[in-house]
Image: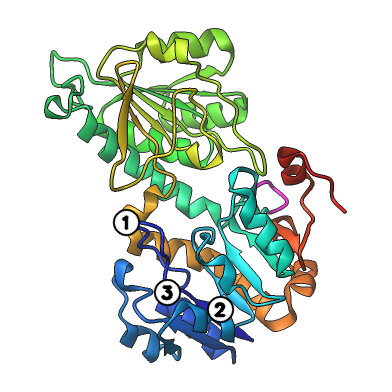
Amino acid sequence: MEFGIPREVRDLEMRVGLTPATVLALTGAGHTVYVEKGAGKGAGFSDEDYRAAGAQIVYSAAEVYGRTAIIAKITRPTAEEQPLFRQGQTIFSFLHLHVSSPDLLEALEMREITAVSYELIEEADGRRPVLLPASEVAGRMAPLIAGQHLRSDKNGRGILLSGLPGVPPAAVVILGAGILGTHAAHAFFGLGAEVTVLDKDARRLQALDEWSNGHITTMFANRHNLERAVRFADVLIGAISIAGHRVPHIVSREMVQQMTPGSVILDFSIDEGGCVETSRPTTLRDPVFVAEGVTHYCVPNITSAYARTTSYAITNAALPYLLAAGEAGVKEAAQLLPALSKGITVYQGQLVNQDIANALGLKIK
């Protein structure tokens, strides 16, 4: 099978669809891999690294798309990439079709593309293996970002996350105790912050309570507790994800208005619509804005800031599905790896995911 890795074209998107290590696994299995010149530069991988792994370097995205049956990407294709789709091609990527521009779905349908959404590949136990490492990275980044924007010279509250003897630490409130929220909780707790986590899953809250010996405060996520927790937060982390669905605004503008000016919101749910009413997507080039006196950081591709680590983590997790698709085709691979079937959102140009269809107000044909 022929695999293609185009260079990502979104601003400051430095992650890459396959690392040289995963290319080596594919070429070692007998597959051909085409890599666009410079595709791995932002993550620290040279063209020579890819050649050494058995890839062929080509000099345009058009050549990558034109030569290959399977495209491996990180972010969903842009409007300028859509005309390059090859009829009947398969694309693996984080797609988030339920919140994407309608023209992407139209292009997938018109070119009879099979689209596999990384974020929806799901094991029987509910674990989403390709999304998981990206969530781990984002969670561990959270204190780095929050600490920067709490600084006085950034118009923050001037609070050190850890506090000092005699001076209390920052109050960090995390909405969601999934992978991202749990890793964020561990990271903030390790720095000495006062951490509160809200979720509706008692088992997740119990796991955090046991891990921290009761030092992380856990609260059931009802409206009363949300209003109370948001009000005292110096840092508010949105870490909610619902597979195939737009995330609801569980934090209203009125709640944000009750926060202390100079506080910080990191809405990591923004790639699925955002869980804070005042949130809107930002970029790594211009990552923050102030609304209701509170700094908002809402970058959908946040883990691109650590492109090398994230590229390794995501592509390692995706490799089994890519190998299976290369060996048997996507349909047959999904029978061997049932988790893959959850990720197939468009099959040969037909939308096949009911949750996405419902989110878009469409009917599956």
Q: Is residue 315 left or right of residue 85?
A: left
Q: Residue at x 27, y 14 (%)?
A: 261
x, y percent for residue 125:
69, 47
State which mark lies toward you, 2 or 3.
2
Separation of disc 3 and disc 1 at Cα? 14 Å
Question: From mark 1 to mark 2, how far is it between C-alphas?
Answer: 26 Å
Q: Is residue 258 above or below residue 107?
A: above
Q: Is label 2 in contact with label 3 (beta carbons under 8 Å)?
A: no
Q: Residue most toward the right?
A: 365
- Main secondary structure along the magenta-highlighted residues: loop
Q: Tag 2, which secondary structure? A: helix
Q: Secondary structure at mark 1?
A: helix
Disc on the earlier residue, 3 or 1: 3
Where is 96 relative to 359, above or below?
below
Q: Which structural element holds mark 3?
A: loop
Tell which circle, 2 or 3, labels the residue nearer the N-terminal end: 3
Corner quadrant of residue 273:
top right
- Total labels: the figure holds 3
Residue range highlighted in magenta: 123-127
Instruction: State which quadrant residue 190 falls in.
Output: top left
In the rendered structure, which amino acid carries the disc numbered 3? Thr
- Which percent across, then down, holds residue 193? 28, 26
Q: Nearer the viewer, mark 1 or mark 2?
A: 2
**Residue under pointer 3:** 19
Q: Earlier in the sequence, mark 1 or mark 2?
A: 2
Residue 306, labelled with which disc?
1
Give the label on residue 65, or none: 2
Looking at the rendered structure, which numbered label has been put on residue 351?
A: none
| x and y, in percent, of residue 170 in the image | 26, 21
Towards the viewer: 271 or 30 = 271
Above or below, comparing residue 276 to residue 19 in the picture: above
* Amino acid type assigned to the residue bearing label 1 in the image: Tyr
